[in-house]
Image (spheres, grey):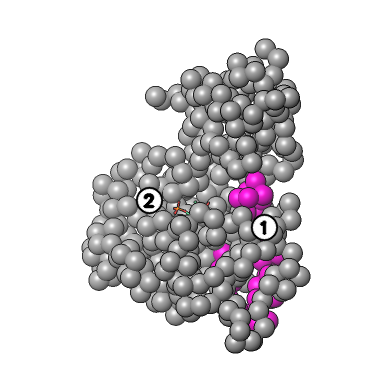
């Protein structure tokens, strides 16, 4: 279905024609033996862009976060993370199952930041009764606040709090490049104060597979061992890493700069949605990256989950997919492959679907 508009996630992107070609032509070797030149080039490019000494290619963002806390956190250690973040909510409890860690949560402000005083209060004293605080994780962009991009200044303030207690800071930058483009900054600036980070190649950058972990050589050695432990040592993996190298390039096939288009499309979509009868809880001024969440205004006696199911069935039958979001809400993400006319059509379909589902006047 070529003209199906899929706004469920920025993970639905498909590789560009140039990526397909790069995959076919990739020079490869056995990456567990460190013989894959494409992977090595990708890891070096990631390190260069993020201002860190070393990089490690991993199968997914989840694996990137997993090997990062495995490297940073001893068994019985505790991770401080924002309550809604991916590492806490969406990674199958890997911190507990594999790292043997607990998580202590801090809630975000609407801007997506964890208040520094709350983080400070969550750091444990050196008391044998208590778990030992071993890592702070920051998610940037912060998905639960509708993808707010967090600043280099905030990151360095947060790192200063953590470092005061000798605790490292890891940035889960699945959508790091969205934060970079939205703030017209660099990844190196955003991560300068962080000890390690992961970023995703397969979301906004449109690669088929993979994330990259970056940090010190010492940290990356530990993360590489952890990756092997969880079965993530892959062999001629340059075939799937090649698109990442292209996506991170400065050339015409680079995929970072174009994220600005996704942000414009998201804002235009949000502007149109916010005006519609039947849509609530959406402030378009807060849409500064590619992430939109909105509520549906139900009438008396109307069940919100049933109303949402009816609404989504109506959009889907017209060629538009949203995804259900907690709290009876609906989520939309823009990405490569979604153009300005798709946004116009998405708005038209949404208005029709609201009326058909009985959420707005026809
Ligand atoms: C998508 C995502 C991940 C995990 O990425 P996968 O490649 O799906 O495992 C981690 N953190 C955040 C914030 C994400 O959005």
Q: Residue at x 64, y 29 (%)?
A: 303
In this picture, residue 2 sits left or right of residue 73: left
Disc 1 C-beta below 8 A from ligand 1: no
Quadrant where the C terminus lies? top right
Quadrant where the N terminus lies? top left
In this picture, residue 13 sits left or right of residue 125: left
Residue furthest out toward the front? 301
Disc 2 on helix, strand or loop? Answer: loop
Residue neighbourhood size for the residue with mark 1, other residues' Cα within 10 Å, grouped as few (<14), some (14–19), many (≥20): many
In this picture, residue 212 sits left or right of residue 234: right
Q: Residue at x 54, y 55 (%)?
A: 89
Q: Position of residue 162 (x, y in %)?
A: 65, 76
Question: Viewer-proximal residue, 224 or 305?
Answer: 305
Q: In which image quadrant can residue 34 be found?
A: bottom left
| Residue of label 1 | 150
Q: Position of residue 23 (x, y in %)?
A: 30, 48
Instruction: Say whether residue 224 is visible.
Output: no
Q: In which image quadrant can residue 135 be found?
A: bottom right
| Residue of label 2 | 209
> Which sits earlier in the primary sequence, circle 1 or circle 2?
1
Q: Residue at x 41, y 47 (%)?
A: 207
Residue range in magenta is 142-171
Question: Viewer-proximal residue, 321 or 195?
Answer: 321
Residue neighbourhood size for the residue with mark 2, other residues' Cα within 10 Å, grouped as few (<14), some (14–19), many (≥20): many
- Is residue 178 highlighted in magenta? no
In this picture, residue 271 sits left or right of residue 54: right
Tell me the distance, in whole angstroms, between the alpha carbons under discs 1 and 2.
25 Å
């Amino acid at each position: 279905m070529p003209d199906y508009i899929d706004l469920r996630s920025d993970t639905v992107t498909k590789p560009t024609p140039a990526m397909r070609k790069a995959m076919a032509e990739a020079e490869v070797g056995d990456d567990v033996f460190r013989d894959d030149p494409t992977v090595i080039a990708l890891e070096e490019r990631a390190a260069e862009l993020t201002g860190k000494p070393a990089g490690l290619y991993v199968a997914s963002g989840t694996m990137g976060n997993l090997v990062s806390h495995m490297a940073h956190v001893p068994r019985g250690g505790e991770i401080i993370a924002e309550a809604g973040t991916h590492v806490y909510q969406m990674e199958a409890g890997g911190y507990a199952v594999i790292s043997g860690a607990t998580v202590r949560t801090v809630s975000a402000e609407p801007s997506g930041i964890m208040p520094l005083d709350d983080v400070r209060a969550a750091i444990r004293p050196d008391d044998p009764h208590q778990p030992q605080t071993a890592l702070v994780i920051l998610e940037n962009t912060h998905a639960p606040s509708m993808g707010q991009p967090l600043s280099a200044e905030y990151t360095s303030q947060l790192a200063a709090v953590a470092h005061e207690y000798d605790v490292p800071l890891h940035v889960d930058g699945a959508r790091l490049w969205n934060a970079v483009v939205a703030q017209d900054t660099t990844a190196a600036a955003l991560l300068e104060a962080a000890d390690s980070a992961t970023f995703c190649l397969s979301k906004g950058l449109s690669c088929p597979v993979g994330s990259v972990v970056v940090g010190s050589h010492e940290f990356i050695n530990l993360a590489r061992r952890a990756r092997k432990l969880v079965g993530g040592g892959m062999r001629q993996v340059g075939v799937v890493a090649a698109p990442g190298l292209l996506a991170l390039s400065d050339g015409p096939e680079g995929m970072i700069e174009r994220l600005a288009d996704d942000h414009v499309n998201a804002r235009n979509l949000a502007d149109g949605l916010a005006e519609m009868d039947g849509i609530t809880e959406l402030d378009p001024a807060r849409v500064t990256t590619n992430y939109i969440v909105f509520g549906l205004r139900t009438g008396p006696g109307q069940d919100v989950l049933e109303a949402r199911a009816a609404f989504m069935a109506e959009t889907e039958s017209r060629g538009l997919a949203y995804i259900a979001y907690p709290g009876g809400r609906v989520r939309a993400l823009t990405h490569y492959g979604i153009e300005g006319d798709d946004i116009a059509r998405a708005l038209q379909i949404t208005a029709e679907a609201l009326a058909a589902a009985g959420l707005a006047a026809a």
